[in-house]
Amino acid sequence: MTLHIAWLGKKSPPCGNVTYSREITNGLLDRGYQVSFLHFAQEDENEVEQEGECPDVALPCLYKSQVYTLPSLRANKVLVESLKKLKPDVVHASLTLSPLDFFLPDICAELKIPLVATFHPAYSEKYRTLSAGTALMTYQLYAPFLANYDRVIVFSQAQKELLMRLGVGAQTLLIIPNGVDTRKYTPGHSGAKDEFKARYLYVYQGRIAIEKNVEALLRSWCAADMPEDCKLLMVGGGSLMPSLMAHYGPEHNILWLGSVVDDQRRLEILRGCDVFILPSQIEGLSLSLLEAMACGLACLATDVGADGEVLTGAGIVLNPQYVKTQLQTLLPMFYHHPEMIRLLGEKARKRVLESYSLSRNLDRLEVCYQEVVHSYAHPVGPSRSPA
């Protein structure tokens, strides 16, 4: 049976949720699903559709950022009317998006449409920091509403247990780790080293934000006194970028590339790099990390969210409380011992092929859709109803 999925997600600004929505919806289209993409857009916004994308429905908003969106007063009505017109078999929301997230269970219950969510917010169970405390508040805020979704997809057992402690039923939660297209993200030729005039390239890819702990990486890079033929590429944008650029620049062999939205350009950069670093204080399951692993880079990431689980035995797992001192020691090791780059890169690629491919993710997602559709067609016990 070919299902129609109404996907509620993000198209901009660039972030992990945007990448996840694009990769999953394109994957569903390739498998023959009908997909309608509902996303927030401001009135003066003109988003260019990429080749192969599904038809979209713009929901009006007053403001949107990489983190959250403020919908307009008409957004709820537009969403309901769109769902009535589309008549999808399943609504899948890639959270967090906006305050409308809290109303989706009632809207979908009223329309008798199964509701699935993927819950992306970063977290850290092992280490207590200000960022981790703020992340926990997000989980506490969302948990009572997530309990009314038909399925909530999470990335790890630790994330599942956290939501269970906050009152979300075990039967609602489904572990499907993020995945990347291992046919697209592969080791390969790149001209990046010639372009950036470097023998060794290190890369950070992600938002330039407080919780990403980017300054710890920059300080450790400078303190490590890296050779002139080693360059650090900073890929991504965010609120901290202007102030950090003023203090850490080309004189330190640090190059700021900003947000790279073109997939082929990002792939060219990754393939040309040797080492990927993710020093975050909190994470969910980083798609940037998985992309780098699939491209065969030696990867270092902090033990937060599901990243430590992904990288254990396939890279170097950092303690988020001692990132600067650990990186100051580790970064020079790769140019002193370049065989580590090849060894860790091979292990990283193998790990992604075994457990974190997009194909594997889609297989499990298809089973999820079939289960919720079947449960609505053949209800057992009391059905979900509007609160």
Image (cartoon, helix red, strand yellow):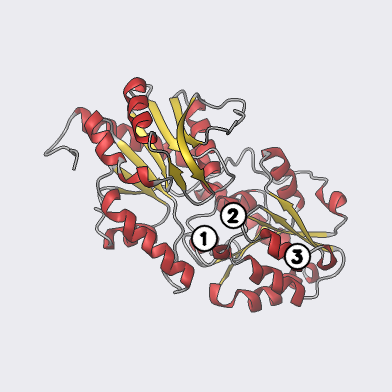
Horizontal placement of 125 versus 283: left or right?
A: left
- Amino acid at dot 1: Asp
Mark 3 or mark 1: which comes first in sequence? 3
Horizontal placement of 254 versus 54: left or right?
A: right
Cα distance, mark 3 to mark 2? Answer: 27 Å
Mark 2 or mark 1: which comes first in sequence? 2
On-image quarter of the C terminus? top left
Cα distance, mark 3 to mark 1? Answer: 30 Å
Horizontal placement of 243 versus 124: left or right?
A: right
What residue do we see at 70% from left, 73% from top?
219
Q: Give the residue pinned by disc 3.
A: 246
Q: Position of residue 321 (x, y in %)?
A: 54, 76
Q: Are marks 2 and 1 in contact (CB under 8 Å)?
A: yes
Is 8 rendered above or below residue 303? above
Q: Quick one: label 3, few (<14), some, or many (20+) residues within 10 Å? A: few
Q: Position of residue 172 (x, y in %)?
A: 27, 47
Q: Position of residue 141 (x, y in %)?
A: 33, 57
- Amino acid at dot 2: Leu
Is 354 rendered above or below residue 374? below
What residue do we see at 71% from left, 38% from top?
264
Mark 3 or mark 2: which comes first in sequence? 3
- Amino acid at dot 3: Ala
Q: Secondary structure at mark 2?
A: helix
Q: Give the residue pinned by disc 1.
A: 307
Cα distance, mark 2 to mark 1? Answer: 8 Å
Instruction: Decide which of 268, 345 is in the foreground and name it.
Output: 268
Horizontal placement of 276 versus 44: left or right?
A: right
Direction left: furthest residue: 381
Instruction: Select label 3 or label 1 by which is in front.
Output: 3
What residue do we see at 34% from left, 31% from top?
77
Q: Quick one: label 1, few (<14), some, or many (20+) residues within 10 Å? A: many
Q: Give the residue pinned by disc 2.
A: 289
